[in-house]
Image: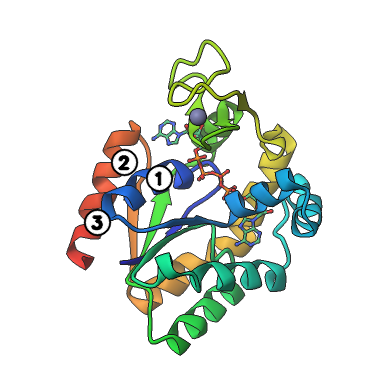
Amino acid sequence: MRLVLVGPPGAGKGTQAQYIASNLSIPKISTGDIFRANVSGGTDLGKLAKTYMDRGDLVPDEVTIAMVRDRLSEDDAQDGFLLDGFPRNVAQAEILRDMLKDWGQALDLVLELVVDDDEVVRRLAGRRTCSQCGRIWHVEFDDKKDDKCDACGGALFQRDDDKEETVRHRLEVYQEQTAPLVSYYADEGILVGVDATGPVEEVTQRAMDAIRPFL
Ligand code: AP5
Ligand code: ZN
């Protein structure tokens, strides 16, 4: 299964990606996670990406596409993958389609996680990420009283781009650049929308129900 998750910041793409990828036994490839790993590692790519991420802008296409091409070329992605956060605009979608076509592959399904702006702001304001295992938590919904990961004991941190003004800008960037992908993939006949409100497990259930006919 070659699957893409699309949806606004805070829709729960990263949260759902960890469960869906594990259910389907395919690698989860998150461009946001790869950029953040490069920022923490102090690489040249990380230094470049950070200037865009801190503002809530997209990292330039040529940088992002080269990174995704390398990752999709790895052995574990040959029989399927779940892309979280890529493509992010129509230009990236077109290059992805051509890249896969060259390899005799194509996307099977694009899942759109649908959630309104107020819920996004609530979710991002309370988001905490584990510095050790990368798991995503929420102070309110997961009733986090300390800043330790319940899974591995690692310290939790708040992302730099979750400040309110940056979140607002990321939502604008989503509307302008990423939302057009919804009609792009609807025209290709591979888009399915999933209601992303309600408890995490219910959203996963809805997503798996939407995926099953395409397996
Ligand atoms: P990226 O990391 O992709 O950020 P994003 O798209 O803004 O998405 P988020 O990670 O903020 O949200 P999410 O939908 O994954 O939500 P989550 O599951 O964490 O990108 C960051 C930056 O990298 C970009 O701004 C850009 O600069 C750059 N970048 C990345 N890809 C790029 C590309 N292709 N091209 C160019 N630049 C790129 O959930 C949020 C919170 O809600 C969590 O606390 C979670 O616990 C909680 N939650 C989740 N589901 C539920 C639920 N059902 N009920 C209650 N709470 C929930
Ligand atoms: Zn952890």
Residue 3 seen by the camera: no
Q: Residue furthest left?
A: 213
Q: Residue furthest front?
A: 75
Q: Position of residue 86 (x, y in %)?
A: 54, 62
Name the side, left or right, on which 126 lies relative to 195: right
Name the side, left or right, on which 116 lies relative to 204: right
From the image, tell me which residue sits under label 2.
203
Q: Secondary structure at mark 3?
A: helix
Name the side, left or right, on which 138 lies relative to 191: right
For the residue carrying disc 3, how many other residues have a C-alpha within 10 Å: few (<14), some (14-19), or many (20+)?
Answer: some
Do the numbered discs 1 and 3 sit on residues whose CB atoms are within 8 Å?
no
Question: In the displayed structure, would residue 67 be above or below residue 11?
Answer: below
Q: Quadrant of residue 58?
A: bottom right
Name the side, left or right, on which 59 lies relative to 82: right
For the residue carrying disc 1, how many other residues have a C-alpha within 10 Å: few (<14), some (14-19), or many (20+)?
Answer: some
Dot placed on the residue nearer the N-terminal end, 1 or 3: 1
Residue 125 seen by the camera: yes
Dot placed on the residue nearer the N-terminal end, 2 or 1: 1
Q: Position of residue 87 (x, y in %)?
A: 54, 66
From the image, tell me which residue sits under label 1.
18
- 110, 132: nearer the viewer: 132
From the image, tell me which residue sits under label 3.
210
User: Which mark is nearer the camera, 1 or 3?
Assistant: 1
Q: The residue under label 1 is which amino acid type?
A: Gln
Considering the image in quadrants, where does the C terminus appear? bottom left
Considering the image in quadrants, where does the N terminus appear? bottom left
